[in-house]
Image: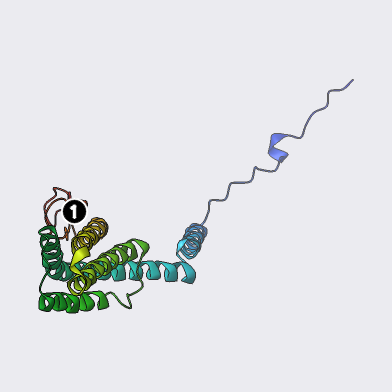
Amino acid sequence: MSRRTGRPSYLLNPPSQRRRPSPRMVVGAVAAALVVGLVGGLIGFVVGRPGPTESSIADLHEAEAERDVQQIIELTEMARRTRDELSPILLAVKQETESGRTPEASQVRQWQQTMRRLTEQFENPPSGTTATNVARSGLRSAVEQAAVAVDSVALIAAGPAAVRDDQLALAARQADLATATWSVAATQLDQINIDAEQGHQHVYLNTGAGDGGISPDGAAEGSHG
């Protein structure tokens, strides 16, 4: 049996040489990669950025926060002015009733005028956050209770002397309730000032001890601790 032989090597086709990539092909590949990267980055930016709805909501929240801070500042200033006028009246009511004396009618009328003015400033309050509204409502309730105490004193002055002592004691209790209510509102006012980064703001009434109200904390005025 004859052995099968292949073709002589000199008759075989020479192996094809590998073609090296031309500079034009390299540049094209780099350009394609850059285009893909830019398109991918653009898609990521479009997908990741907030849409019109999200941007509008964020703007509303920011505007609400700024409005609330301004309301807190204005409410605190009004509370200070109110405290400066209200404290002497409540203190006088307590002192007069505890001593069994009835204030002069002219003095009581002046108190009533002041209380009407202080009450009116809380009418038509602006719309605010829940925390700010709670502080405002508490201050308003305290002023209204103080006005009732003053009106009670006015009725005592015009009423029979036989029941005057009991009525004076009732007016003193109303004054204490007004002071206690104010202290709760003042504590809330202090807290919302802290939350609004305005620091501690202690706007408590100066009516002496024994009124059953909340005492201010020991933090320094305006501090953030």
Identify the residue position indicated by label 1 in the image. 211
Q: Residue at x 11, y 70 (%)?
A: 103
User: Residue 176: x, y in percent?
Assistant: 21, 58
Q: Could you tell whether 36 is left or right of 202 in the image?
A: right
Label 1 neighbour load within 10 Å: few <14, some 14-19, many 20+: some
Q: Nearer the viewer, residue 196 or 87?
A: 87
Q: Does any portion of residue 193 appear in the rendered image?
A: no
- Name above or below for residue 122 compared with residue 16: below
Q: Could you tell whether 55 is left or right of 141 in the image?
A: right
Furthest toward the right, the residue is 1
Type of amino acid at the residue the image marks with label 1: Asp
> Hey, which quadrant is residue 13 in on the image?
top right
Badge 1 element: loop
Q: Does any portion of residue 48 appear in the rendered image?
A: yes
Q: Which residue is drawn at 45% across and 65% down?
A: 50
Q: Could you tell whether 195 is left or right of 101 in the image?
A: right
Q: Could you tell whether 3 is left or right of 152 in the image?
A: right
Q: Nearer the viewer, residue 146 or 74?
A: 146
Q: Nearer the viewer, residue 75 or 29?
A: 75
User: Residue 69: x, y in percent?
Assistant: 26, 67
- Name above or below for residue 82 compared with residue 3: below
Q: Nearer the viewer, residue 86 or 70?
A: 86
> Hey, which quadrant is residue 170 in on the image?
bottom left
User: Residue 54: x, y in percent?
Assistant: 46, 66
